[in-house]
Amino acid sequence: MSADASDDLANLSMEELFQEFFQTRREDIKWEIVLRYSGMIKSIALRLQDVYANFAQLDDIINEGLITLADTVEKYDPAKGGFSTYASIRIRGMIIDYAKKQDWVAASVRKRVQQIEQAALELTNQLGRDPSEQEVADYLNLSLAQYRRALAISFTRNIISLEEVLDKNCEHWVQGRTTNPEDELQHNELVQQLAVAIESLEEKEQLVLSLYHEHDLKRVEIAAILEVSPVRVSQIHTKALRKLRDKMAEYIQE
């Protein structure tokens, strides 16, 4: 492609680029669109970093995201909704699928996660309050390092689980989107139900979700704000996500 052709593409609006691509299916136009939306990949990847941090670097996810974005341009149908919405769902889905395909959680670690969750529940009933990380670790005869690694994995699993529930439903809506008022109503009901589910959470759980998912703060930063340990933030976050996952799954299955 000549420099003049490249300059011509740079001067086109996004709408004009898509119109030209639909007519010609030119590779240079497709990658111009990908380039313009590439910032979306990094933004989403940073928000979901806890999902893949155990086995992949940000650059790996961005590279996979570029491939996904190119495929998204190929398959995009403007009659079914805006490109940004469709692309963001595809990228989020890619990250979740990428995480699920990695053999990064041994059976022994998964079992330990289950034991920690059960121990936390038993100690809460015994003590009448949330147990500290040391209390749970001692209860299971684990070191703090073992406990924290398992808790981090539990944190990740719950993020993936909730993302799957929401993204599966949202992707179905976007792909099948029409001007039918019933479809719009279904989507609005989903959003409203999620808002109701969030409002049902404890105040601290809502705050942690807001700081993590809306303001993109890391667990260490949230811990400093709440004056608790990062592990305690993980406990609150995991508990909140589990509640939301269960409520949304129940609603979607109705």
Image (cartoon, rainbow, N blue to C red):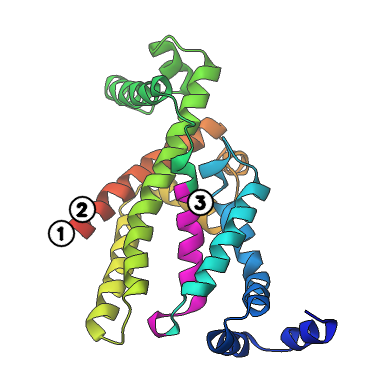
* First along the sequence among labels 1 and 3: 3
Label 1 packing within 10 angstroms: few (<14), some (14-19), many (20+): few
In the picture, residue 180 is in which quadrant?
A: bottom left
Asked whether the viewer can see residue 236, the reply is: no
Q: Which residues are magenta?
A: 79-97
Say which amino acid is labelled 1: Glu
Q: CA distance from mark 1 to mark 3?
A: 28 Å
Which residue reaches farthest top?
A: 141
Q: CA distance from mark 2 to mark 3?
A: 24 Å
The residue wearing badge 3 is 95
Choose mark 1 or mark 3, whichever is in front. Answer: 3
Residue 26 on the magenta span: no
Q: Which mark is residue 250?
A: 2
Where disc 1 sits, the SS reads loop
Q: Is residue 213 above or below residue 219?
A: below
Give coordinates of residue 25: x percent, y percent. Answer: 57, 81
- Please tell me which residue lies in front, 30 or 180: 30
Choose mark 2 or mark 3, whichever is in front. Answer: 3
Left-right relation of 240 to 61: left
